[in-house]
């Protein structure tokens, strides 16, 4: 996958054609159950590949929390801020990003705690997978969500040329407002993926597996009083250190993802244009 090129003009035209600005969240996200094409039980591997069109692909996984308190984030990305992610990366010289969207819930309570798109590059296909995500609005009172399923899928069910050919790690971003559950039981892995011999893994273990190929970040949204409590942030700094990032304004999520990627690539001196100031397509400065 990953065919086609992204342009802000193409995405804005698509957004206008689909009248997103006048639609409600439910009208945009029409899935009322797990889309069969996003069912992780049917997916052995998602691939991010180089091609003539994209000779130096860069894999980026974005895990969206689809539990009850978080549906506003995918809605804002669709309606407003996808250009802040894709446009900012391309403007900065990251010419071939391939983005895969995940839907993440709670494997204790939810019917669809892991939903998997494809690595894509074009406005049309990014929109296709993003808006197919089922906003289950579940979750429960178990003090956490299953953000660790993103690490599981990245570690064991993706194959990415940026790392396999160039030893350039991809990126995993999860976005939420809860702690991460402490492990993934073996029966959950067997229920949600094609693995039939899986054992229980701790979040620290599966994170380490993912970090072999990916830089991993978690964006914690401070969107209400509960999410601002230390209780809700518990454990994240121990897992991710400085790659646990608190976000006060959810409308800056896409911009912050672009900033993290650009900053990391600049530290590696990889394919970043040297400009004194970088702006998102919405005209906001990117802070590096």
Image (cartoon, rainbow, N blue to C red):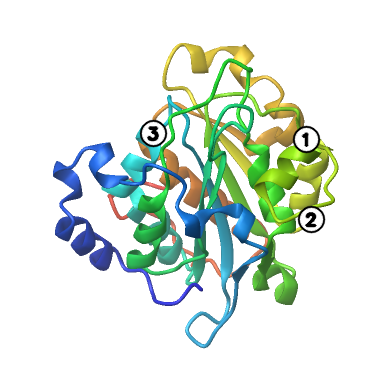
Query: Which mark is first along the chain, 1 or 3?
Result: 3
Identify the element where label 3 is drawn.
loop
Most extreme residue toward the bottom, as rendered?
A: 52
| Residue closest to the eye, 71 or 279 | 71
Q: Residue at x 40, y 61 (%)?
A: 126
Snapshot quadrant of residue 168: bottom right
From the viewer's perspective, is the residue at label 1 or at label 2 nearer? 1
What is the number of the mark on residue 251?
A: none
User: How many neighbours does mark 2 have within 10 angstroms: few (below 14), some (14-19), or many (20 or more)?
Assistant: few
From the viewer's perspective, is the residue at label 3 or at label 1 nearer? 1
On screen, residue 110 above or below 199:
above
| Circle 2/circle 3 CB separation < 8 Å | no
On screen, residue 190 above or below 240:
below
- Separation of residues labelled 3 and 1 (CA atoms): 26 Å
Would you name the residue on which mark 3 appears?
A: 71
- Separation of residues labelled 1 and 2 (CA atoms): 21 Å
On screen, residue 234 above or below 121:
above
User: How many neighbours does mark 1 have within 10 angstroms: few (below 14), some (14-19), or many (20 or more)?
Assistant: some
Snapshot quadrant of residue 160: bottom right
| Circle 1/circle 2 CB separation < 8 Å | no
Identify the element where label 2 is drawn.
loop
Is residue 96 rendered to the left or right of residue 159? Answer: left
| Circle 3/circle 1 CB separation < 8 Å | no
Q: Residue at x 51, y 73 (%)?
A: 1
Q: Residue at x 30, y 55 (%)?
A: 281
Q: Position of residue 219 (x, y in %)?
A: 54, 35
Would you name the residue on which mark 2 appears?
A: 212
Q: Position of residue 182 (x, y in %)?
A: 75, 28
Q: Position of residue 174 (x, y in %)?
A: 57, 41
Q: Is residue 224 visible?
A: yes
Would you name the residue on which mark 1 appears?
A: 185
Q: Residue at x 66, y 46 (%)?
A: 192
């Amino acid at each position: 996958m990953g065919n086609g090129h992204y342009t802000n003009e193409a995405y804005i035209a698509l957004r206008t054609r689909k009248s997103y600005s006048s639609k409600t969240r439910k009208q945009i996200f029409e899935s009322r159950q797990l889309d069969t094409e996003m069912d992780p039980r049917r997916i052995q591997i998602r691939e991010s590949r180089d091609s003539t069109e994209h000779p130096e692909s860069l894999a980026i996984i974005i895990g969206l929390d689809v539990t009850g308190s978080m549906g506003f984030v995918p809605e804002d990305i669709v309606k407003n801020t996808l250009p802040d992610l894709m446009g900012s990366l391309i403007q900065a010289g990251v010419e071939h990003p391939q983005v895969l969207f995940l839907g993440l819930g709670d494997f204790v309570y939810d019917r669809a705690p892991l939903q998997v798109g494809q690595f894509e590059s074009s406005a049309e296909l990014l929109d296709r997978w993003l808006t197919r995500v089922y906003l289950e609005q579940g979750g429960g009172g178990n003090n956490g969500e299953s953000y660790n399923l993103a690490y599981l899928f990245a570690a064991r069910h993706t194959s990415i040329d940026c790392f396999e050919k160039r030893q350039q790690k991809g990126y995993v971003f999860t976005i939420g407002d809860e702690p991460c559950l402490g492990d993934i039981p073996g029966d959950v892995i067997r229920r949600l993926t094609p693995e039939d011999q899986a054992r229980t893994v701790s979040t620290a273990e599966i994170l380490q597996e993912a970090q072999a190929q990916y830089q991993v970040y978690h964006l914690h949204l401070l969107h209400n009083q509960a999410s601002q409590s230390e209780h809700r942030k518990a454990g994240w700094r121990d897992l991710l250190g400085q790659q646990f990032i608190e976000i006060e304004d959810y409308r800056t999520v896409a911009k912050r993802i672009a900033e993290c990627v650009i900053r990391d690539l600049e530290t590696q001196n990889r394919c970043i244009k040297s400009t004194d100031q970088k702006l998102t397509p919405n005209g906001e400065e990117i802070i590096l």
